[in-house]
């Protein structure tokens, strides 16, 4: 790959008609072959270090600008909560701060919706209030105290208190953990520096806006990295694994894609061009995509309008939670160098399963290391989803989007033990935690809007069972389909019976008016006040240019690149997300907020591909910053291998001499016997 990139660089830099240039190119390639073993490890390490340093510097600069942009209103008007909804949210946070969680959960506010009042604790999504109070009471005093202790600047709007007095006060109120922390700070000579709840609520949108920018960049990093190993990680078209026709689509387009990849120097559908030493997602192309995505996300109006300082509304926290769910979900689908079935069982002489199935599926009912890793990140996705549920009612979009992506992977022939473990862990952990949110309760098990992800979960269990039996018993295609039909038929009968029993009891709730209005034409909520709100209307033609600006022009290019050449298990999520976000934002202009992350990621990946081509074309290597962590290990391995080879050669030499001596002795004995 390095020599190929060097050839491309030479050809694009000099006239093709010059024979002298061809000779220079051949000499350079020959020299690179001779010096590669000596210079390459050190030079690759140096270039990887430079890449990582520059990326870190630019990333910090982008995040700093993202934060300062969102402080514009605070710098001009001070620490003021804007608009009605943010002020109500602040009032709820103040009540939680003063009275604690138990009183907040049972709080009935008689001052709102007079004369009816409102049971706030069971009708509000409390994630944002809990976050603000936790920052105000726990994290920020410790953080500001530590910063002052090491001699760095702290904001001027903090109040310094004695850590010892705070420790005594917290101990008397029953907060043993924070009392211990304050006591430890006092023993180290730190002060307890508090920021008022009003100031925390004003700054929280800017903090979480910058955090959402970073996590969106990580999503682009994960989806644009080319690992070059493991089933599900190879780049290709979105239809490459489609049953029956996927093989012919891949075969028909392989020559075109390979030609484009060789001519452009890109890694599109050409995994053999990626060095097998690549172990991390921190590569030249992926890092460039991450930085471009962060740049777009930091300034795109669709995100800024919900994350400005003083705009203390649910969406400012929910966007961070949503992007975290998407990042951890795609991370759980990353392939591994370790195979599944092939590493655990030897293939039979007459193998009916095939290398592709064995490469992605566990054998029998064993659980491989890649499957455990997928389950771990799937559980992290469930925890992030819990925070999303606690923060905003838009969690319904998130769980259905993840479920739709899992279902699409199955339909496209990409089911694997990795996918099963990731989605099962996500659904079980996420649903169990979501039912703990008071306003949600058992809704995930009863609402028609959320039964789709449950159906995907149940169906995936049946498919995984069939695939594991297939690898264990070496079943052919006909036997597998017969097993699937029997199991699915039995499960369908049982599911129909359960629905028939529960439906008359009113167990299943109806689809909400807002969701129904997104699908049924001319259907409104029935509330004239709600229907008259401008943000509930359909998007107008110029809306996307207004809220996405130039990203609206670049994102379709990234969408096309992922579809035709850069699609795998993780990056295919961007296609599902892009289609869903465009559909819903077109139906309701308020939901254009959902397009900010995906438009930034697709636009950033389009820019990052070109930037990565330029970087690797100039350097002549496929850079991977992960080599910084493995270079010493690899070097030690090379030395050990060389030493072992020398020892083996010595042993082999000695054994050859002894064998030769034995042969000579045998010949001599034969000759003596003949003479006798």
Image: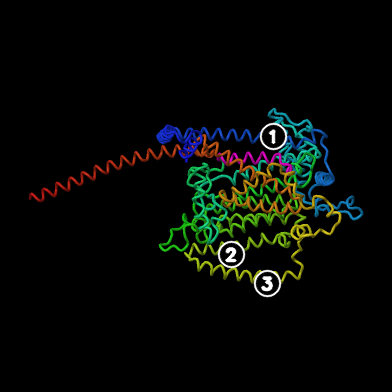
Q: Which residue is mark 1?
A: 64
Which residue is at a point 71% across and 61% down the rendered structure image?
445
Viewer-closest of 629 and 289: 289
Q: Which residue ends up furthest to the left in the rendered image?
A: 676
Q: The residue tagged with tag 2: helix, strand or loop?
A: helix
Residue 201, given in percent of the width and then of the height, sits at: 79, 41
Q: Quadrant of residue 54?
A: top right
Q: The residue tagged with tag 1: helix, strand or loop?
A: helix
Viewer-closest of 205 and 285: 285
Dominant secondary structure (helix, strand or loop) of the stretch shown in magenta: helix
Q: Which residue is mark 3?
A: 497
Q: Which residues are magenta?
A: 283-303
Q: Which residue ends up furthest to the front in the rendered image?
A: 17
Q: Residues within 10 Å of mark 1 (few under 14, many from 20)?
A: few
Q: Is residue 429 left or right of residue 472?
A: right
The image's colour scheme reads rainbow
Circle on res. 515: none
Q: Which residue is mark 2?
A: 462
> How far apart are the two marked residues, 2 and 1, measured between alpha carbons?
48 Å
Residue 302 highlighted magenta (yes or no): yes
Q: Residues within 10 Å of mark 3 (few under 14, many from 20)?
A: few
* Mark before the other along the chain sequence, 2 or 1: 1
Tell us which disc is closer to us: 2 or 1.
Answer: 1
Find out whether the residues at labels 3 and 2 contact each other: C-beta distance under 8 Å: no
């Amino acid at each position: 790959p390095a020599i190929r990139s060097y050839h491309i660089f030479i050809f694009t830099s000099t006239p093709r008609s010059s024979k002298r240039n061809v000779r220079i190119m051949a000499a350079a390639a020959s020299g690179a072959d001779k010096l590669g073993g000596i210079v390459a490890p050190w030079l690759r390490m140096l270039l990887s270090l430079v890449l990582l340093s520059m990326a870190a510097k630019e990333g910090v600069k982008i995040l700093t600008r993202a934060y300062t942009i969102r402080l514009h209103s605070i710098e001009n008007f001070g620490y003021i909560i804007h608009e009605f909804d943010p002020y109500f949210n602040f009032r709820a946070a103040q009540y939680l701060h003063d009275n604690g969680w138990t009183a907040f959960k049972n709080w009935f506010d008689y001052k709102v919706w007079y004369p009816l009042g409102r049971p706030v604790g069971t009708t509000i999504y409390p994630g944002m209030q809990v976050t603000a109070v936790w920052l105000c009471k726990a994290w920020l005093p410790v953080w500001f105290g530590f910063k002052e202790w090491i001699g760095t600047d702290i904001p001027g709007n903090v109040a310094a208190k004695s850590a010892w007095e705070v420790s005594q006060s917290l101990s008397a109120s029953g907060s043993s953990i924070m009392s211990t922390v304050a006591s430890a700070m006092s023993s180290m000579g730190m002060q307890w520096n508090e920021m008022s709840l009003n100031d925390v609520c004003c700054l929280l949108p800017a903090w979480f806006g910058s955090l959402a920018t970073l996590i969106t960049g990580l999503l682009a990093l994960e989806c644009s990295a080319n690992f070059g190993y493991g089933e599900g990680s190879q780049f290709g078209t979105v239809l490459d694994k489609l049953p029956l026709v996927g093989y012919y689509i891949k075969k028909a387009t392989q020559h075109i894609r390979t030609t484009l990849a060789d001519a452009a120097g890109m890694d599109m559908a050409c995994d053999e061009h990626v060095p097998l030493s690549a172990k991390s997602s921190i590569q030249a192309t992926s890092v460039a995509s991450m930085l471009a995505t962060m740049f777009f996300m930091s300034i795109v109006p669709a995100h800024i309008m919900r994350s400005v300082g003083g705009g203390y509304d649910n969406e400012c926290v929910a966007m961070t939670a949503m992007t975290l769910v998407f990042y951890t979900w795609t991370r759980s689908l990353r392939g591994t160098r370790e195979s599944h079935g092939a590493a655990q069982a030897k293939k039979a002489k007459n193998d009916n399963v095939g290398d592709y199935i064995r490469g992605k599926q566990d054998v029998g009912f064993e659980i491989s290391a890649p499957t455990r890793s997928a389950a771990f990140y799937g559980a992290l996705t469930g925890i992030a989803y819990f925070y999303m549920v606690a923060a905003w009612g838009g969690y319904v979009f998130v769980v259905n989007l993840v479920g739709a992506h899992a279902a699409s992977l199955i339909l496209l022939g990409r089911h694997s033990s990795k996918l099963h473990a990731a989605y099962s862990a996500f659904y079980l952990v996420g649903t169990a935690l979501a039912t703990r949110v008071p306003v949600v309760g058992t809704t995930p098990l009863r609402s028609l809007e959320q039964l789709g992800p449950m159906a995907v979960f149940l169906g995936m269990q049946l498919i995984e069972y069939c695939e594991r039996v297939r690898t264990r018993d070496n079943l052919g295609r006909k036997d597998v389909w017969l097993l699937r039909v029997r199991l699915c038929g039995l499960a369908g009968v049982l599911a129909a019976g359960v629905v028939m029993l529960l439906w008359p009891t009113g167990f299943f709730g109806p689809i909400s008016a807002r969701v129904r209005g997104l699908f049924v034409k001319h259907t409104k909520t029935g509330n004239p006040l709600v229907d008259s709100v401008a943000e509930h209307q359909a998007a107008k033609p110029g809306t996307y240019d207004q809220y996405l600006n130039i990203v609206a022009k670049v994102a379709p290019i990234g969408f096309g690149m992922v579809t035709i050449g850069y699609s795998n298990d993780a990056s295919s999520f961007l296609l599902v997300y892009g289609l869903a976000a465009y559909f819903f934002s077109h139906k309701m202009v308020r939901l254009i907020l959902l397009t900010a992350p995906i438009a930034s990621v697709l636009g950033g990946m389009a820019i990052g591909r070109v930037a990565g081509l330029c970087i690797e074309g100039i350097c002549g290597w496929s850079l991977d910053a992960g080599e910084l962590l493995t270079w010493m290990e690899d070097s030690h391995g090379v030395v050990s291998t060389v030493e072992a080879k020398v020892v083996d050669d010595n042993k082999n030499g000695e054994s050859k001499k002894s064998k030769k001596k034995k042969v000579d002795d045998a010949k001599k004995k034969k000759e003596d016997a003949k003479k006798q």
